[in-house]
Image: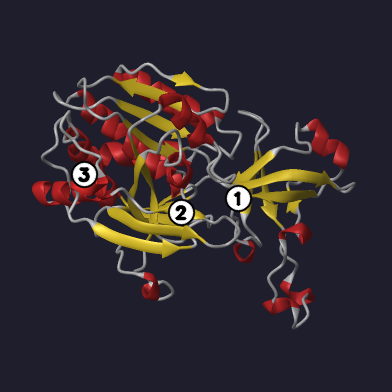
Amino acid sequence: MNGADEPGGDPQARLRTLLVELMLAPGLSGHEQRVRRILARRLSGLGLATRTDRLGNLIASLPGEAGAPSVMLFTHMDQLGFVVRKIDADGLIRVERLGGVPERALLSQAVLLCGGEGRDRPGVIASKSHHATTPEEKYRVVPYAELFIDAGFSSRDEVLAAGIDVGTPVVYRPNVIELSADRIAGTSVDDRAGCAVVLEVAGRLMETARRPTVHFVFSVQEEFNLRGAVAAAQALQPDIAIQLDLLLATDTPDMSHRGDVRLGGGPVMSLYSFHGRGTLNGTIPHPALVALFEETSRAIDVPLQRSAHTGVLTDSSYVQLVGQGVAAIDLGFPMRYSHSSTEVCDLRDLAALTRLVVAGIAAIGPGFSLDRDAVQ
């Protein structure tokens, strides 16, 4: 799983470099331009032409064998966070949540108010002084509507003069912590790790003699109720959609009852996802793709973990409904502490996921069948 047999140097080192660069770039849903520019530059460096649609999805296409099913390999580039909704007279800033931000983990968090490159402003979500809290307050989760950000301003006019106004995007302060030789912690591992893997896969597939046509899509607004990837799929009309994202690691005491997915245990395949809270959708993968990646994992000796979860939703749940239907599957990497300001992944899992995806896609040729009744 260390990828030492791969051509072109150490893939894990490349993945580390890509991931760190992407994690440090703020890109709230609907405001992904800084991340998109990094990805476009990296794809151009590989020799791939890119295009951006009106929603902001970044797309690069790699032609392949005639008659083979076309593949859309996609991941989202945006992150969750906040938008400014009100600026108080004293210069304190109120926000709305954008995406599934956990209120219980917000007090005292460092944030970045994204006024534009060179104009960003650090801030902190205020926490009432402990010495002044009542016994009841000490155990209460403060709703986000009551929170405010202190960015060092003394008046509303100062905030406006700094280029911050209603609608300004706010994210957790971008940071990277190298926990060990293999493990990375920090902001927006979801899903900048997926972006790093897709970039690495693109480079590998360009070196692969036989492959189907592959469309690499870095989608927008996933954290804003799964908006971007559907438009890309409608334009591309792929036969197969392979989505890369985190899959919940369950190897900590608070998650052990949820499954058997271990950080460092290799890539993960989702066999079932369903979001039962408000959005009644999910993904049951196409059996031909399940069989493909099970067989591929055995052939290249990469362990493949399995996941089945409720409370989880990805872009594939809507992409699969495009046109006459798209054969879809969710693959990913184990990740701890999702949607917090400090998520954790293992670079060995990213390297192994890269190998699995490259080998799996390379095996999709003109004879690859998507007939559900042909799968045992």
State the residue position of label 1.
Answer: 99
- Residue 113 at what x, y percent from top left? 67, 41
Residue occupying the far bottom of the picture = 135
Q: Amino acid at mark 1?
A: Gly
Which residue is under mark 2?
282
**Can residue 181 be seen?**
no
Q: Determine the CA span between mark 2 and mark 3.
A: 23 Å
Distance, label 2 to label 1, CA atoms, is: 17 Å
Q: Nearer the viewer, mark 2 or mark 3?
A: 2
Three-letter amino acid code of the residue under disc 3: Leu
Looking at the picture, does residue 189 appear above or below residue 15? below
Whether residue 189 is situated above or below residue 207 in the rendered picture: below
314 relative position to 328: left or right: right
Residue at image position (73%, 46%) is 151
The residue labelled by disc 3 is: 356
| Of residues 111 and 47, the one drawn nearer to the viewer in this rendering | 47
- Upstream in the sequence, badge 2 or badge 1? 1
